[in-house]
Image (spheres, rainbow, N blue to C red):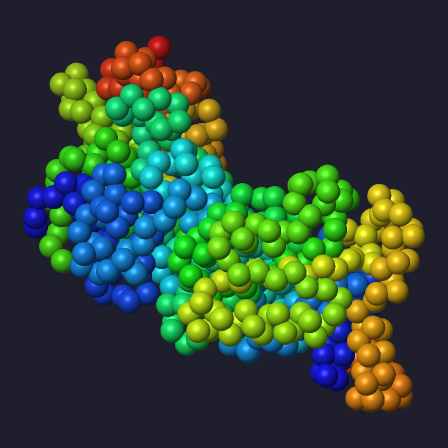
Amino acid sequence: MAELTYIEAINSALREELARDRGVYVIGEDVALGGPFGATKGLAAEFGERRVVNTPISEGAIMGLATGAAAMGLRPVIEVMFVDFITLAMDQLVNHAAKLHYMSGGQLGIPLTVRVQQGAAGNGGAQHSQSLEAWFIHVPGLKVVMPSNPADAKGLLTAAIRDDSPVICIEHRALYWTRGEVPDGEHTIPIGRAALRRPGKDVTLVATSRMVEVALEVAGTLANEGIEVEVIDPRSLLPLDLDTITASLRKTGRLVIAHEAVEGAGFGAELLAQVQEAAFDYLDAPIARVGAPFAPVPASPVLEQAFVPGAERLAGAVRKVVLGA
Amino acid sequence: MLRLLRTMWTIRAFEEKVSELFGRREVHGLLHLSIGQEAVAAGACAALRTTDRVVSGHRPHGHAIAKGVDIASLFAELAGRETGCCRGKGGSMHLAAPTTGFVTATGIVGGNVALALGVAFACKEREKQEVAAVFFGDGAGQSGAFHESLNIAALWKLPLLFICENNGYAEFTPLSAHTPISQLARHAETYGIPSATVDGNDVLAVRTAISDAAARARAGGGPSFIECMTYRLRGHYEGDPAKYRELSELSDWKTKDPIRRFAATLVKKGTCTHEQMRAVEAEARASVEAAAQKASTGAWPSVDEVTTLVYAG
């Protein structure tokens, strides 16, 4: 085990996969220069600019390039600098990458990995702070993972690169410099398996990405009040490990869902629907969602802080589900 | 020479048959026929190797046939049968047969150009002197994907042939109402890409231009842009009454029919006789009929297939 930052863990996964498989290419804006956050630092020096490829600011063409190359059997990993910019590449992602395997009757494989970061942190404002994972889980053919810590960042990215379908790894910018233990050498985490972060018997709290650390903080606080919170990190939103969540519900009978994206039509809405279809009989209380308010992300530090769902709001929602009223 | 003629007749016969079957509701979907544009598909693919890769757009039947895709599997695909080249999951605009080098078609105008960029990138990385070719219409020239792709292909010297079928109309609207540029090849100049504008109804002119471009790409010279001036003799889609164009324009272009024109040239040059010409057409029509017949007996896909092949593996 080594203690790495989240961004170092990503770098480590990329380095190992570039070394392991000649078909892996890292492609994106500034990636040969290390990228704005350092995820690709040192890779061009080690593997050459033929495999660590800088591109113009042309997100649509980059996604098309990677999709076409993947259809030909390469294993490209592209970096989209901010999820907000993926809007420019949605045709290639949604109409092409996600569908070519299906439309071709299985003849074409699209082993494409899209790395992208998101989240409201650093006052970037409405076009550099969104959380858009719900868009992608609505698209058959895509897989969507959201690592919440350095070990998962490495394990999920490695699994994504080796996957034969397109996978979007949604990183959180605010987690990039957080530290954690990461297994040495090859480390993969199967896509579609949730992680139990903290056991508890009173309420299940499903939290994604940065909200996992908020959820753990809340669980600690509420333990002092006599409420035992079970925290589950789905890690993969599509495919979703519903079994782990419903198994927890059998024990707790209560569910709160927390994500940083706006609540409306978010992952929480989908999970809520799936849970009530699969486990209605286990529910002892209405399910609660905690997400951002339905607004663009504001720029002012005061407003941004109020926008992001914090520990206090989440604790309030959990108390209400457990205690009623 | 006869091979070129045979390819063009096969495409023509195929699409006329498709039109007939569409009228009888035996083939389905949104169909975009390339009748009148056959010389581009036939001439271009004749200049490519089997191992070269083709990406097409929403009007792909001719390109697929010229690249060597089995026509019975194309009929079956359009008819929604399990025996279709994509098991009935693709349809007319999403044909794929990668073993023939026909990587895929896509129904998103301009989207195919960016996709082809990646195919060309892979060709370059494979180091087997393969080239990629992408077919698109003049309408795609106003899309962002088109310009982004030209830029990157030029910057990285990708072995990519941009083959523009300029038929003068983007859907219903004439090119002049879409862009002040009358010839799309002008855009290639901006990016430093060698270009040629050729008579797209002259199959030999197309073949020569593509052949030159492919040789340049194989030698590491990067992309080329070949604009083929042509005309679709049918509407934008099957069923389009095409009231947006003058009948005189249509009849004028009918006199430039690429197939009859090439046949007449061959006879005039003494390459072959009238009888041989007619035989080529008859053989093409017979093979198309046989393929259509074969496709019509193909099994329907099981309804369980709705949710199969969403993911690989």
Q: Position of residue B14 (x, y in %)?
A: 78, 70
Residue pictured at 30% horizontal, 61% vertical: A50
Could you say which quadrant of the image residue A323 lies in?
top left
Residue B51 versus residue B137: which sits nearer the camera? B137
Front position in the image: A72 or A198: A72
Q: Residue A296, image x and y in percent?
A: 42, 20
Callout count? 0
Q: Is residue B255 visible?
A: yes
- Which residue appears farthest toward the left when viewing the image? A2
Relative to the observer, which residue lies in front, A178 or B65? B65
Q: Is residue B13 above or below residue A168?
A: below
Residue B296 lies, in percent from the top left, at 77, 71
The answer to whether residue B151 is left or right of residue B45 is: left
Q: Residue at x 74, y 70 (%)?
A: B202
- On screen, residue A170 versus residue A48, left or right, reads right
| Residue A279 falls left or right of residue A199 | right
Q: In this view, does A218 lie above or below B268?
A: above
* Residue at x 51% of width, y 74% of height: B215
Q: In which quarter of the image is the C terminus of chain A?
A: top left
Q: Position of residue B151 (x, y in %)?
A: 46, 51
Q: Is residue A279 visible?
A: no
Judge whether A57 appears above or below B30 on screen. Answer: above
Could you tell whether B242 is left or right of A262 in the image? Answer: right
Task: Give me the residue at 22% from left, 55% from top.
Answer: A44
Asked which quadrant contains residue B271, the reply is bottom right
